[in-house]
Image: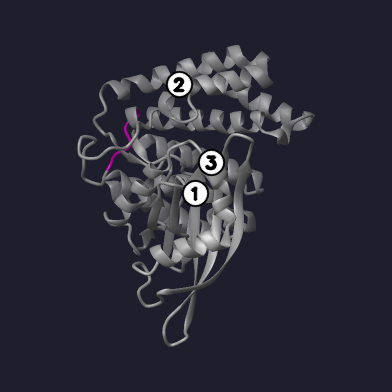
Amino acid sequence: MLKRVEHFFDNEYLLSLFKRKLPEFYPSFPKVKDFVIYHHKKNIGEKSYHLVLEYRLTLANDAGQTKEIPVFCAAHSSEPREHFFFALKFLWQHGFRNSELTIPRPLFFSTYLNGVFYEGAEGNNLHHYIFQQNKTEINKIVSQAARWFAKLHTLAMSPKEISFPSGFMADVVPGLAKVYSEINRKHPHYLPLYHRLYDELLKREQAFRDNPKDLCLVHGDAHSDNIIKTSQDKIALIDLNDLSWGDPARDLGCFLEQLEYMTGREGLDLEYTESLKQLFLDEYFKVAKVKLDDDLKFRIDNYYNWTALRTTTYQLLSNLVKRDENKLKRIDHRLQKLKHILNV
């Protein structure tokens, strides 16, 4: 399988692939003239690869007119990727096609390459506007994001109708065993605390898991980098690889925690951040026709804390914090704060 990684950069192979696959999606521009490759993620090891590539294609028609499109490919040497394609195709067919609230357009899945090909959503993400401190755009996108999640969570279907993975904490990739193993390898002094934190988070989730009356499709990675403003009145949610069956509170808690984290990091004041969080929840509850009771608030808070722990874990295990004492102190502060909140 690893030898196939060469095909992702082989112009002759790719040109043949695109000429066979793309005309049905772009019948007005059926000819593939050329393309340029951009690397968004290029992790290639001795035994595995994880790629997110963009092929900026130039298409043409018989009249000589041309059109540029961004075709992305998400591929992995071993992890399943067909689910990602299935998720895109499913949502495209169920109300997320070229609407105010949309997604990247699914194109095709290559079993040979274990890669999903899709037309990318072009524009700036919410993080871009947070960095610019453009409050007008931030408010508008946050409100649209609330409607996007409400639309997803209220799709009428049951888990028996369609196969999606579980979105509960213990089932989320890479899995708790992997998290514990990596923490033990790089920061073993935190391992006992990690066990206590996760034991409490899972215990708090269990009541809903035992009686999942509101089970629905969840995006699974609800943060500002995955929300793209594609035009004046449209947004797209990208990175649907974690689409799964779970508690809608997961998306809400994740989005709120990441919104607070990003706005704080980019220098926006806490009062404004709190108003944004309230705007998001008010719009979500209005569109989803849901009331915030004590049970739902408890679940949202639990996923908020879980997301904070996942963010902290990512930072701990990345090379960005290596030997950076200030970053390590901030990480320790967040872990101690979670210890206090969860009373472990």
Precedes in sequence: disc 2 or disc 3: 2
| Residue to which mark 2 is pinned | 201
User: Whole-Å distance between the Cαs marked 3 and 1?
Assistant: 24 Å
Residue shown at the point (21%, 42%) measured from the top left: 157
Residue 337 seen in the current view:
yes
CA gap between label 2 and label 3 equals 18 Å
Type of amino acid at the residue the image marks with label 1: Ala
Q: Could you tell me residue 167's position as x and y percent?
A: 38, 32
Sequence order check: which comes first, mark 1 or mark 2? 1
What residue sits 63% from the left and 58% below the top?
Answer: 132
- Which range is magenta? 290-294
Q: How far, Cα to Cα, is label 1 from label 2?
A: 31 Å
The x and y percentages for residue 265 are 65, 44
Residue at point 45%, 61% (across, down): 17
The answer to whether 49 appears left or right of 112 in the picture is right
Q: Earlier in the sequence, mark 3 or mark 1?
A: 1
Q: Which residue is mark 3?
A: 258
- Foreground mark, 3 or 1? 1
Q: Quick check: 280 above or below 327?
A: below
Residue 74, disc: 1
The secondary structure that dominates the magenta segment is loop
Render colour scheme: one colour
